[in-house]
Image: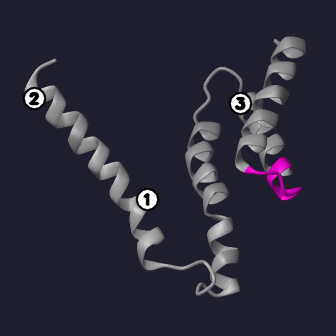
Amino acid sequence: MSSTMLMIILGLAIVTYIPRMIPLVFFKSENIPASVQGVLKNVPFAILGALIFPGVLTISDNMMFGIVGAGAAFLAAYLGANLIIVVMVSVSVLSTYAYFFS
């Protein structure tokens, strides 16, 4: 492995580590107000929505795949499932939909 590749991997590791470590060093969970913690709990779902929504609108073959997948993800998130469960529900619903309707 070349030294350039090693430097790239090291740089990526540092850039990934810093944003994860800063909150642990500077914030204590008992010092964060409950209202801020409530907002932070919803950040993964907001990011998931921002990543999925453009894809739902740009499906060229059958837009119903996007609508069904987004609906399943929205419903699972609304019912309080964590992020992994939301993704798994959406993939399962789309797999079933594709099996029966395509």
31, above or below 66, in the image: below
76, above or below 19, in the image: above
Which is nearer the N-term, disc 2 or disc 3? 2
> Which amino acid type corresponds to the residue marked 3 in the rendered image?
Met
Which quadrant is the N terminus positioned in? top left
Residue 69's disc is none
What range of the chain is rendered magenta? 76-82
Structural crowding at the residue carrying mark 1, measured as other residues with C-alpha within 10 Å and reported as few (<14), some (14–19) or many (≥20): few
Relative to the observer, which residue lies in front, 19 or 87?
A: 19
Q: Which residue is mark 1?
A: 20
Residue 44 image offset from top left, x and y in percent: 62, 56
The residue depicted at 69 percent of the width and 85 percent of the height is: 35
Relative to the observer, which residue lies in front, 45 or 67?
A: 45
Nearer mark to the viewer, of 2 and 3: 2
Residue 63's disc is 3
The residue depicted at 71 percent of the width and 30 percent of the height is: 63
Q: Which residue is mark 2?
A: 4
Residue 6 image offset from top left, x and y in percent: 17, 30
> Which amino acid type corresponds to the residue marked 2 in the rendered image?
Thr
The quadrant where residue 46 appears: bottom right
Tell me whether circle 1 and circle 2 mark residues in contact (CB < 8 Å). no
Residue 71 image offset from top left, x and y in percent: 81, 44
Which is nearer the N-term, disc 1 or disc 3? 1
Residue 92 image offset from top left, x and y in percent: 82, 27
Q: Which secondary structure lies at badge 2? A: helix
Tell me whether circle 1 and circle 3 mark residues in contact (CB < 8 Å). no
Residues at marks 1 and 3, CA–CA distance in whole angstroms: 37 Å
Relative to the observer, which residue lies in front, 96 or 56?
A: 96
> Which amino acid type corresponds to the residue marked 1 in the rendered image?
Arg
68, above or below 39, in the image: above
